Amino acid sequence: MRLLILLILIIFLSKSNSVFIKQKQNQIPKTNNPYKLSNGLALTPPMGFNYWNFDGCETNLINETMMMNTAYAMSTNGMARVGYEYVNLDDCWMAKSRDENGNLLPDPIRFPSGIKHLADYIHSLGLKFGIYGDIGTTTCKGYPGSENYLEQDAKTFAEWGVDFVKMDGCNMQVEDMKEAYTDLGKYLQATGRPMVYSCSWPTYAYVENITMPFDYIEGICNLWREFQDIRDDFTEWTQILDEMEDSLPKRSQFAGPSHFNDPDMLEIGNGLESNIEYKSMISLWSIIAAPLIAGNDILTMSKETLEILINEEVIQVNQDPLGLQGNRVYQNQGLEVYQRTLINDSYAIAMFNRGDVQSDITITSDMLNLTNHQNFNIRDLWSHTDNGTFSDTFTASVEPHGTIMIKLSPKINNIYLPLKYRKHLLK
Ligand code: GLA
């Protein structure tokens, strides 16, 4: 009997010890974990507005009236309803120098009521407010940079009620950016105010051909600019798309909820491209889970521009909760197919004709790697019509520079069943 008790005791001790060791082992990586941004924001790609693409800094259009009117327009014209929420400043909002205590100041002519006043107004509309800064000595246009002021500026942004920080990288060595972007992320987080954190580090690494640690930046920024600045030009933005698809390491692997690749803001409505091209742009930006930051003049845009920006079926693809970035799965002489995996075993497909003549593009189940012969309903996301069933192939005629964007949903989703039965079937 004693022997038995002793045996049980030994087994118990050895077990509890191994549990203890296990717990200890589990704790080790936690305490050694490198810093991770955890603001719980940007679970899907951020959507909003920024004036840079239509305005730059050249005119006197950038001021608090323009920003407030834009925010008001967004809150009433359907943009806010479909998800555009961040109303963002870009370069040239600042005064040329800091105050005597080193605080950033707004340009007194453009923003006489101050930045907090602007943020409060934007918040009163149910929208969010974004700001621009630069991690180096000065911004790209020569306004005060945040180098040596990272903590102070993070606090200022929080006090003003900022919800989104675009941190540019002019006038800093790329080699110093890892530390600087990490530090600013920590300071932003330490303020306790949730602020989406957009980093431009990879753009500057790209320009200087310096290898970028994407597996690192995806842990410290909510989004990161990848390539050169976009222009309102079909050839130029398709080049950015190529860079996104062809550059190594494959960018899509780093995207997910709270961390997205950013090919730059939209040019839709800026006037130098056709609406066909603008529709292609938002279709492809949605497939690659890119932030949708409207870069056009919201106050003067045409009805057609607005309709392109607020196509809810396309935006639903962009905002799919899985947050997976799609990829190009086929290309041949300017005819291309892009595929993004969506929630509920569905897929978004963009059939993109980069060429100058109307052409047929065919998708096949092999091309899309759908080998279980599932039948899908085809929904055309621009004509808003159902377009038959996909089992093995589907062909569409696509206009030059145009995109046919469809969603494939497993056929069972459309069988009519009362909700209580559907829930079980769709599990
Ligand atoms: C850089 C950025 C642009 C814009 C300008 C402002 O070029 O990439 O998006 O913010 O700076 O100067």
Image: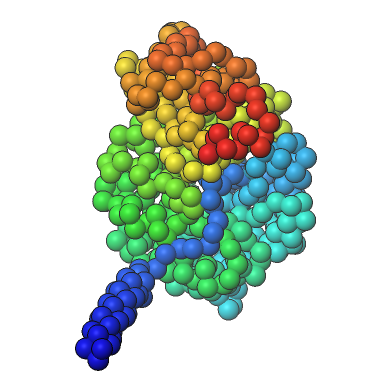
Q: Would residue 344 be seen by someone viewing this image from the given angle?
A: yes
Side (left or right) of 15 relative to 252: left
Q: Which residue is drawn at 70% across and 26% down?
A: 302
Nearer to the camera, 150 or 286: 286
Q: Outermost residue, bottom direction?
A: 2
Q: Where is residue 146 in the image (x, y as percent from the top left)?
A: 48, 66
Q: How many marks?
A: 0
Is 281 situated above or below 276? below
- Quadrant, the N terminus: bottom left
Q: Would residue 62 be seen by someone viewing this image from the given angle?
A: no
Q: Position of residue 37 (x, y in %)?
A: 46, 63
Side (left or right) of 103 relative to 353: right
Specify how the rendered protein is coloured.
Answer: rainbow
Is 170 situated above or below 78? below
Side (left or right) of 146 relative to 158: left
Q: Where is residue 84 in the image (x, y as percent from the top left)?
A: 64, 43
Is 346 situated above or below 191? above
Q: Residue at x 46, y 25 (%)?
A: 349
Nearer to the camera, 415 or 254: 415
Q: Which residue is drawn at 53% across and 43% down?
A: 321
Nearer to the camera, 218 or 77: 218
Q: Which residue is drawn at 57% across and 61% down?
A: 195
Q: Position of residue 408 (x, y in %)?
A: 50, 24
Q: In which quarter of the image is residue 41?
A: bottom right
